[in-house]
Amino acid sequence: MNVSTLQWAITFQWNDVSTGNLKTQQISKQQVSKHNHAIIIGRDNVVCDIVINDSSVSKEHVKIYCDEQVRRFIIKNLRDTNIPKLDDEDLAIGKELPLKLNSKIVLGTQKIEIIDIQIYELESTNYSGLKFSNPNSSSVNPNPNSNPVNSSKNSSSVNPNPNSSPVNPDSTSNKPKHWWQEPTIQVAIIGAIVTLVGSILTLNANKMSQETEKIKQDVQLKADKLKQQEEFKIEKQKLYNQKFSDHRQKVREIKETMRQKKEFYNQLTLKTNDSCPNTVRVAISFTALDDVSETRGWINVEPGGLDRTPGGATIYAGVFLHAKTSVNNEEIIWKPTKTGRIERFVSTSEFNYIQEPFLDANIEEKPVKFYEVKLDRKITKKAFNCNAGTLQLVDAE
């Protein structure tokens, strides 16, 4: 007997503000038995099936359940304040709205998207075994018309007619048969075996089909997740590039305004004395003219070469440097003792960033110390010296 059981699964996706990563979670009917197969979304990690780590989300914000009669998902608001939205429509307290694929739920400032909906019937087969006889039928007699050969009623030791020939009964017709030798029983057995084998093959085929479908769904979910993560990464990079471009344009405008007003900003120039056998590589971090923190590198300052200006135009009285060189194949880093310091990220290749470093995950980055250099005039000149295995920064002559 086949019994159809309705099954369902729904997949949510949102940006986790605590980690900055795109998060995907699928909930199936079997996972939410504690709420009568309803899904609770909110901030409470004890009660909720989907936990959103965002202070703008209520502890128990909305409930989602599957209406199995009409085969659709329904969302219901659980809050009389902090009203959620579904596809830009307010969801008042007690109000219910149907969900569909790509629906967008807004809880506080958190946006959640429905990226997959599955509602399907799962057939379960109960095999009750085989019965070879009908309980209402009589037992099979192999030869109902025959009597036992030694029956006293039909045989006698005295022949009443001496002239008659002795009667020899057909021993073959009276030979008893086993029940399994009956043709009808054999046909029933063969039919039952065929049915049993067919049922087993059907069950295995259904199981393999379900497993294959689940694998396909898992692969598709992973592919969709990777695609959305890549799209999110590209969009984030575009926004950052626009922000960086706006920053550079703003700095140019401020410089021009200051030039017209004959106002000055502070800058640093660097050179390397002949005491250093190799190039000094410098990274600089400073507060730009538009009050945005900017970090860039690398500036190569050659021994005995021309003065280098690493940028860093600022109205503040200091910038921060990270400098290094090599002497006898050993790396030496400039580490002054009595000065301020900050930590910034650098990479082995050239870089220039504001606020958020290295959006590209393929860039190898590491945090290093930057040390403060005081700017005491419009143009402050400094020089690197190499002395006794140390790198020093002194006033330029």
Image (cartoon, helix red, strand yellow):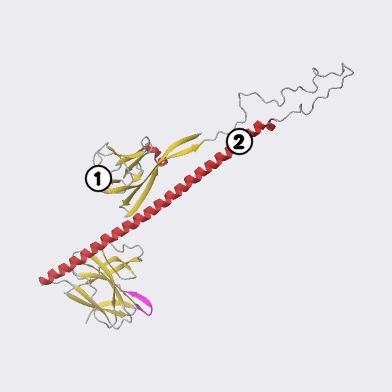
Question: Tag 1: residue type?
Answer: Asp
Residue ID at (53%, 43%):
204
The image shows residue 173 at horizontal and vertical percentages of: 76, 27
The image shows residue 302 at horizontal and vertical percentages of: 29, 80
Secondary structure state at the residue bearing disc 1: loop
Determine which residue is flagged by label 2: 191
| Near-viewer residue (151 or 20) | 151
The image shows residue 130 at horizontal and vertical percentages of: 59, 33
Q: Residues within 10 Å of mark 1 (few under 14, many from 20)?
A: few
Residue 271 falls left or right of residue 184: left
Question: Tag 2: residue type?
Answer: Gly
Q: Residue furthest right?
A: 162
Residue ID at (62%, 28%):
133
In the rendered structure, which segment of residues is drawn in magenta?
A: 326-333
Secondary structure state at the residue bearing disc 2: helix
| Near-viewer residue (240 or 375) | 240
In the displayed structure, 136 sits above or below 252; it is above
Give residue 240's quadrant in the image.
bottom left
Determine which residue is flagged by label 1: 88
**Viewer can see residue 346:** yes
The image shows residue 347 at horizontal and vertical percentages of: 33, 68
Is residue 327 highlighted in magenta? Answer: yes
In the displayed structure, 186 sits above or below 353; it is above
In the displayed structure, 64 sits above or below 147; it is below
Give residue 65's quadrant in the image.
top left
Q: For the residues marked 2 and 1, what is the alpha-carbon distance in whole angstroms?
A: 62 Å
Residue 13 falls left or right of residue 181: left
Q: Which mark, by number, is residue 313? A: none
Count of marks overlaid on the render: 2
Residue 48 falls left or right of residue 265: right
Residue 138 falls left or right of residue 257: right
| Near-viewer residue (394 or 103) | 103
